[in-house]
Image (cartoon, rainbow, N blue to C red):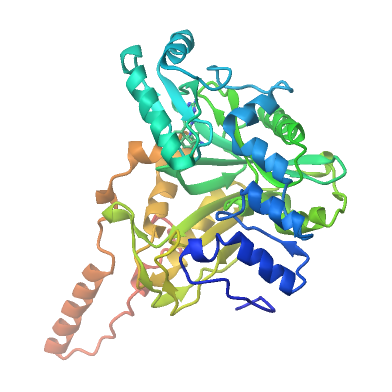
């Protein structure tokens, strides 16, 4: 299904000739009298310069102000802004460290292990762990040069290393009239190389008290930069359930559907209403968590081959269906997965009355999804969802490193055993000239009565 009333080609597939061509996009908007730009996620969605250029052209940018994006785009200025409120932060340096000697002094005060982080960084880039003072100088130099080449800004700072943390983020929504609410948390601890794999809402471990405190802090962070629109405030939760503010993402995130599922709020609709200048029609006390939601990211990657992107044609593409199942995707059967972008095919989201039901529905939806032509991460997601550590809620950001080995997925992909057995039976019956019907493949596997395959 194609929903757009009109589409304009900006340029060829490589993103630096199309999705990242802010000037060209604005030019097209002006030609067509476009009144608003939704930046999506990725590409220009957190680019303050683009937001400012859109505004200057007299077009509404559906998102926060360029100033808010600037403040939150830099971790040190984000922490600086957050300091105006009482928001817990990981102990470490007050600001950027300007020399190795200064860094060493702060490192000894902070204690080990510690992290050196790039202020302009994201996704773990420019982040170095230091276990002992002897390694500090080398790691700091590496962090600075990595940050300089990746972001053109070599500012780095120190934070104590939080061991075994959970990644928990709070969805916030702010209008232009000073109203800010939080739409509870998403737990995104199951990650692989800073790429989220499974997200859920609410977190299995937050108490109502911690949830409310984190929510309040997230609202304060948003207030600290006069935030407008939908945003996400990221926290780490340590083993003792202490939480620390890390950074704020000034866009709608990939995993926003799980928040929509548990609150009943359409976040994109709210973004547009806020951009039009409308007031939020609900307050914090109107918002309640209803049930549980899980999202898995379906990537065209081969989990048995180091998650190598597997590009090619979607020969078969059939979505799962049913109560509590949502698929957000952009592909149809027969389409090619392009090489130019992140190879995400779809987001598969389920909702249930409780966590168990949401997970059960996800496992069923994964089984029902039919994708051939490319390898996908569906089996890998099934592995995670079936794992005892995930089921019990007792996991952290090291889940995949700790528990996953590609061998675990190297089971036969087709029903080869069954096919061989049926072929043997067919041959046997033919030989004996007995006319007993052979059961249809699949029927013998039904578990409707025992429900014990998982
Ligand atoms: C940390 C941390 C432990 N201690 N900061 C990684 C990306 C960036 N958003 C923050 N990250 C981390 N910061 C302190 N002081 C551990 C991580 C981290 C991590 C955080 C969230 C999700 C997955 C992660 C995987 C490795 C490290």
Residue 212 at what x, y percent from top left? Answer: 72, 31
- Name above or below for residue 404 compared with residue 237: below
Seen as rendered, the residue at the extreme left is 431
Residue 442 at what x, y percent from top left? Answer: 36, 73
Residue 178 shown left or right of residue 139 in the figure: right
Q: State the residue at coordinates (85%, 49%).
A: 280
- Name above or below for residue 262 compared with residue 143: below
Residue 444 at what x, y percent from top left? Answer: 34, 71
- Name above or below for residue 167 compared with residue 175: above
Question: In this orientation, does residue 183 appear?
Answer: no
**Closer to the camera in the image, 412 or 239:** 239
Question: In this orientation, does residue 367 appear?
Answer: yes
**Closer to the camera in the image, 264 or 429:** 264
Residue 56 at what x, y percent from top left? Answer: 76, 55
Q: Quadrant of residue 427?
A: bottom left
Number of numbered discs overlaid on the protein picture? 0
Name the image quarter holding the N terminus: bottom right
Q: State the residue at coordinates (73%, 69%).
A: 30
- Name above or below for residue 379 compared with residue 431: above
Residue 102 shown left or right of residue 425 in the figure: right
């Amino acid at each position: 299904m194609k929903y757009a009333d009109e589409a304009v080609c900006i340029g060829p597939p490589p993103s630096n000739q199309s999705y990242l061509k802010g000037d060209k996009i604005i030019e097209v908007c002006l030609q067509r009298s476009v009144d608003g730009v939704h930046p999506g996620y990725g590409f220009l969605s957190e680019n303050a310069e683009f937001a400012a250029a859109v505004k200057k052209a007299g077009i509404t940018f559906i998102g926060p102000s360029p100033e808010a994006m600037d403040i939150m785009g830099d971790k040190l200025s984000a922490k600086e802004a957050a300091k105006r409120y009482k928001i817990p932060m990981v102990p470490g340096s007050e600001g950027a460290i300007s020399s190795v000697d200064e860094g060493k002094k702060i490192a000894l005060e902070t204690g080990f292990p510690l992290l050196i982080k790039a202020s302009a960084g994201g996704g773990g880039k420019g982040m170095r762990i230091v276990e002992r003072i002897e390694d500090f100088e080398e790691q700091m130099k590496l962090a600075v040069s990595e940050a300089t080449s990746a972001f053109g800004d070599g500012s780095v700072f120190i934070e104590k290393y939080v061991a075994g943390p959970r990644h928990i983020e709070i969805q916030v929504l702010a209008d232009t009239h000073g109203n800010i609410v939080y739409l509870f948390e998403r737990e995104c601890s199951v990650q692989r190389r800073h790429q989220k794999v499974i997200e859920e809402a609410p977190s299995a471990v937050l108490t109502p008290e911690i949830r409310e405190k984190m929510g309040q802090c997230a609202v304060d962070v948003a207030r600290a930069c006069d935030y407008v629109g939908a945003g996400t405030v990221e926290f780490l939760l340590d083993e003792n359930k202490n939480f620390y503010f890390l950074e704020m993402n000034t866009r709608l995130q990939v995993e926003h559907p799980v928040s929509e599922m548990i609150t009943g709020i359409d976040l994109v609709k709210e973004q547009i209403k806020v951009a039009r200048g409308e007031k939020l029609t609900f307050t914090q006390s109107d918002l309640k968590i209803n049930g549980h939601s899980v999202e898995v990211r379906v990537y065209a990657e081969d989990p048995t081959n180091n998650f190598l992107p597997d590009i090619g044609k979607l020969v078969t593409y059939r979505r799962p269906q049913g109560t509590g199942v949502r698929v957000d995707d952009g592909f149809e059967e027969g389409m090619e997965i392009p090489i130019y972008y992140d190879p995400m095919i779809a987001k598969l989201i389920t909702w249930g009355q409780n966590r168990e039901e949401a997970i059960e529905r996800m496992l069923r939806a994964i089984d029902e999804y039919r994708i051939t032509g490319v390898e996908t991460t569906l089996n890998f997601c099934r592995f995670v969802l079936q794992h005892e550590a995930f089921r019990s809620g007792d996991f952290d950001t090291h889940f995949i490193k700790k528990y996953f080995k590609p061998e675990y997925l190297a089971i036969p992909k087709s029903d080869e055993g069954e096919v061989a057995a049926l072929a043997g039976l067919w041959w046997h019956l033919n030989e004996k000239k007995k006319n007993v019907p052979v059961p249809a493949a699949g029927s013998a596997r039904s578990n409707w009565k025992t429900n014990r395959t998982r």
